[in-house]
Amino acid sequence: MTIAFVNFPVIILSIMSESSKNFSSIPILDYSLSLSSSTKPTFIPNLRNALINIGFLYLSNTDAVVDPALVESLKSYIPKLFALAQDEKDKIRMANSPHFLGYSRLGAELTKGKTDYREQFDIATEHVSRWRPGDPDFWNVWGPSQYPDESLIPGFQQTMKNYLTQVAALGTTFITLIAEALGLPSDGLSRFYDTPDRMQHRGKVVQYPVPSERSISNQGVGPHYDHQVLHEPLQLLQASPHPGIQVQNLTGDWIDAPPIPGTFVINFGRALEFATNLGIVRATSHRVLSPPVGSSSPRYSVPFFHNIALDVRVRDPKYEIEFPPEILELRDERGSLSQTDSVNYSEFETQPSGMVQLMGRVKSHPDVAQRHYPALFQRFFPDGLPAAGSAY
């Protein structure tokens, strides 16, 4: 999602034809139109087009759910968060957490064999792990977050918690709109979710430093899909004015998704693609570029990943959804999804969602796996701890 500046000008709804089979820009949908029975019929067809043909959208006018003042407050904390002393950040390093929550140093991950030049804190909605000895390992992928010492950055923890609560609420409501756009009842996707006390959604606060000619990489994040139903998310807050996100269209071209004031960027993940008859909804390959050499400041973003329940096997017949013929026709008009630079999360064909999450996290953060999931660590890293993790 993108809320990039202090002032929030009115956003004009960008209309795209449902017959479009490719795209050269990302549509802007006005969330406020979904709140009224008189304007919702304008909103739903545009959401349907984004779901089937694009996989990405900007969402504007979300003030009814996400407080703009809270967003501005969170943004003011981000430079202070990354300016903390390195030893203070390392006190809450991700390796402490079996839930893969905490701080990751600059350059700790690879995508497609190239270093992702970013530094980040993984912080999730509040949750108590239900895992007990003998339970599946993937039940422990969700649990409590780590925060910096309150005295070092007063107010950040509560601000972040409030923000995650609000964007999670937006995500939950938006999923009912997705169901309606796919010709289902508003609760048509509820089978993929557990009770609220058994759900957790994950956020990140990310800094993409300005690279130099001597930097190890100018790749913020390499080409990838997201595994959750909605991402980077459900909502991505582009918290600085730098461009960076690029989305790959059906012909393989990279389309810019620059920050637009007063919006979130939303995209749809592999879980939803697999759950909707292998491809009614489109999960779209995307990447993040570092700020250009010579930029005066880093790029900041706050992605938020709206999860499905840990035990769901999206290709299990009991989760199968029957879609109206007109929705299937729109999928067929679009055609098969082309090969892209991103190929991952095929595990949704056979594994429960939680295991897919755990496998991805283990590959991305082998130091965490070595400490907390030694059997999986040995499976993926038989030669020992690599220099960096790589989920893709």
Image (spheres, helix red, strand yellow):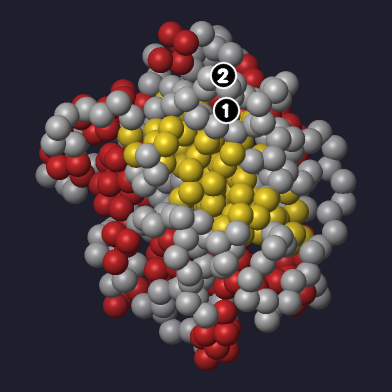
Check disc 1 and give the amino acid type. Gln
Q: Determine which of the numbered discs, if any, sits on residue 370 in the image.
A: none
Question: In the drawing, does residue 118 fall left or right of residue 98?
Answer: right
Cβ–Cβ under 8 Å for marks 2 and 1: yes
Q: Secondary structure at mark 2?
A: helix
Q: Dot 2: within a 10 Å radius of its alpha carbon, few (fewer than 14), some, or many (20 or more) residues?
A: some
Question: In the drawing, does residue 115 fall left or right of residue 256?
Answer: left
Task: Between residue 38 and residue 254, name the one nearer to us.
Answer: 254
Q: Residue at x 74, y 71 (%)?
A: 16
164 lies above or below 106: below
Q: Residue at x 36, y 78 (%)?
A: 320
Question: In the drawing, does residue 343 fall left or right of residue 158?
Answer: left
- Name which quarter of the figure residue 23 lies in: bottom right
Check disc 2 and give the amino acid type. Phe
The image position of residue 7, as x and y in percent, is 85, 37
Which marked residue is nearer to the observer: mark 2 or mark 1? 1
Q: Which residue is mark 1?
A: 207
Farthest right residue in view: 10
The image position of residue 211, as x and y in percent, is 59, 24
| Mark with earlier residue (2, 1) | 2
Q: Residue at x 52, y 67 (%)?
A: 282
Q: Which residue is mark 2?
A: 82
Residue 11 visible from this viewpoint: yes
The image position of residue 339, as x and y in percent, is 45, 65
Task: Between residue 369 and residue 296, name the one nearer to us.
Answer: 296
Q: Residue at x 52, y 36 (%)?
A: 219
